[in-house]
Amino acid sequence: MRELMYLQAINEALAEELERDEKVFLIGEGVQTGTFGTTTGLVDRFGPERIMDSPLSETAIAGVAVGASMLGYRPVADLMFADFMYVCADEIFLKAAQWRFMHGGLQTLPCVFMANIGAYRKLGNEHSQCPFSLVLRSPGLKLAAPSDPYDAKGLLKTAIRDNNPVVYFFHKGLLGMSGPVPEEDYTIPFGQAVVRREGDDVTVVAPSFMGFWAIAAAEELKDRFSVEVIDPRTLEPLDLDTILVSVRKTGHLVILDEDTERCGFAAELAMQVMEKAFDDLDAPIKRVCAANYPIPGGVMEKYVIPQPEQVMAAIEEVMA
Amino acid sequence: MKFEKEDLVKLYRNLVRTRAFDEAAVRWLAQGKLLAFYHPAQGGEAPGVGGCTFLRDDDIVYPHLRGHGLPHMIGKGISPKLYLAEHCGKATGAAGGMGGFHSVFPEKGALGAGGTIGSCFPVSVGWALAAKKNGRGQVVVCFFGDGSANRGTWHEAANMAALWKLPVVWVCENNGVAQFVPIEDAYPLEDLSNLASAFGMPAVVVDGQDVMAVAEAVTAAVERAREGKGPSFVECKTARFGPHGIGNPDKVHGKDRDPRQIEELKRRDPVALFRSRLLEQGVLTEEDAERISREAEAEVAETEAFIDQSPFPDDPGMLDRALYAE
Ligand SMILES: Cc1ncc(C[n+]2csc(CCOP(=O)(O)OP(=O)(O)O)c2C)c(N)n1
């Protein structure tokens, strides 16, 4: 199969959906140029009316996505860095997420908020976050976090076709990663996790970039433990079943999450597994997350964001 | 304000130092010494340098992102050494290696800077309110770009500042482009100073490549604020000579910026313009100008040696010390 880079897969998903449905449009700062290459070139094909460079106004960008979606359009708002969601929090978390509900289900808001996540670039607190929990604690939003080019394309197409607001997080560290992407039209249903590697001893749930390390750790430890790696692909809806099936088989669970530990996805998932499969667990669940600090600038970030050694250590501990 | 000869020389020296450090930052980023990213100031040094050089030590500055605040800090009399050590991630940096590109130097009125553009306005109002309450005559000068002025935060902050006659000066560094978006496509009027009129704030538009024009306009606005007459707005028409950030393509709307337009902009280099003016007026001789350049290069070399000899921080205990106050 043909290979594409993750950023090209995103670009292709946008192009195909723009082509397929004239109600789709893209809005964001410099999207005609493309800060990460994800939107580059689209303006040549679809014109500035549909690939809209906007002023530096996240609140209004997000608001436009919400408003236009209520009148039948399918806007994709490019927020550049996920950290900037704080700037338009009202529009995303109180309007996009909650308006349908608060208006008795009379409206649909088919909009997408796309943004890059992730640290490891020493960019500090406002350009490095991975704010899964911010989104997850807002029922009404869906959350997709692709970890390879195939998923990047398939999940974005699903996000655009979904009749609900979807937050689509692409990871900085994956932008240049290549992988097979079919040329024909395909989508990936939300709420379907994928087992990236089969194993019998321990389950590692690893969304987005963390999957990389989970696989690396599984490989490194393969003579000692057989590690099963699961990528949830969407965190809301979450495919708990696939995770439970795995945990029932292995009896051990490690959860990786690049987001801040406190009140995070890992905490939530661990609790859900406890509620459903406590008796199947042979050891306490372990999580590897960002420590409970903001992400500092410079080399200090290594003390806060998860490190590959911690993943190995967590697997060893849970198996000890 | 009447500028004495020594004021003009100081202004020129700060411009030259800013250019030298900015060029060094670009080099260091390429060498992997400067961490994260860098958005050069080249072409847009005059608003920061001109707007800060004659402030009081206890006046408060919110630096704009260009040059990551080097023009403002150098203008304010802050040695760029500790800031750049910080930006290179060293333990000797101003924030002990915790801040990265975020600048801080509280003793000289640099209380911090954020990475979310447009967050400068509300915090500046808080500083200005405190300055009004404490009665020490401090003034806040908030620097921002044309793009920053598109944030909604501007309106809330400007309204409060005007309503409460707070001692704040808004200095817009309008270089005509925000990353990849030209200002014509981000604001419907010619001058951003129109943003002041809705709140009844006085505003002036100055040639932002003329460091003296900036210094005069900002000084007048600062004096007004110090006298308790409230906020005002200075729009500096300036330029960006290169791409938004190192490594970014220099494009608008997906097309390369017109090289002729950039050549045109470079003909009005703020450092060169001021140099010829001072030479013409006899304020500086060629030798003086050469000496100032050499001194700036020596300062850069000394800073680089300091950074090279400085260790990276390795104490995770810093995280707890920095997180909450006692
Ligand atoms: C809230 C927010 N939105 C977007 C960005 C990304 N960004 C950084 S600088 C910049 C352009 C700033 O333009 P302007 O204020 O005109 O300053 P200039 O760089 O042109 O001097 C953008 C879009 C950001 N850092 N923060």
Image: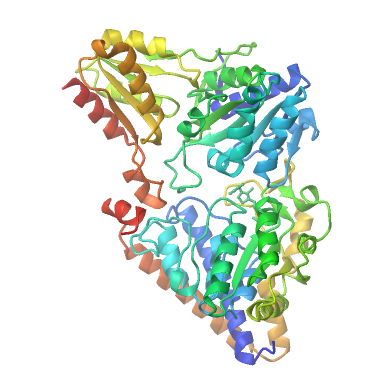
Quadrant where the C terminus of chain A lies?
A: top left
Question: Residue sitting at 60 percent across and 34 percent down?
Answer: A94
Q: Is residue B182 left or right of residue B86?
A: right
Colour mode of the rendering: rainbow
In the image, residue B175 lies at what x, y percent?
Answer: 71, 60
State the residue lying farthest toward the right. Answer: B189
Which residue is at the front of the view, A31 or B305?
A31
Q: Residue B95 lies in what quarter of the image?
A: bottom left
In the image, residue A131 lies at what x, y percent?
Answer: 48, 35
Residue B315 visible here? no
Answer above or below: position of B118 versus B42.
Answer: above
Answer above or below: position of B259 versus A267.
Answer: below
Question: Residue sitting at 40 percent across and 24 percent down?
Answer: A211
Which residue is at the front of the view, A266 or B65?
A266
Residue B79 visible here? yes
Q: Is residue A20 left or right of residue A309?
A: right
Question: Residue sitting at 64 percent across and 89 percent down?
Answer: B285
All told, the count of numbered labels is 0
Which residue is at the front of the view, A297 or B290?
A297
In the image, residue A62 lies at what x, y percent?
Answer: 66, 36
In the image, residue A78 lies at what x, y percent?
Answer: 64, 35
Q: Residue B274 lies in what quarter of the image?
A: bottom right
Quadrant where the N terminus of chain A lies?
A: top right
Question: Residue sitting at 79 percent across and 56 percent down?
Answer: B260
Which residue is at the front of the view, B193 or A7?
B193
Q: Is residue B62 left or right of residue A303?
A: right
State the residue lying farthest toward the left. Answer: A320
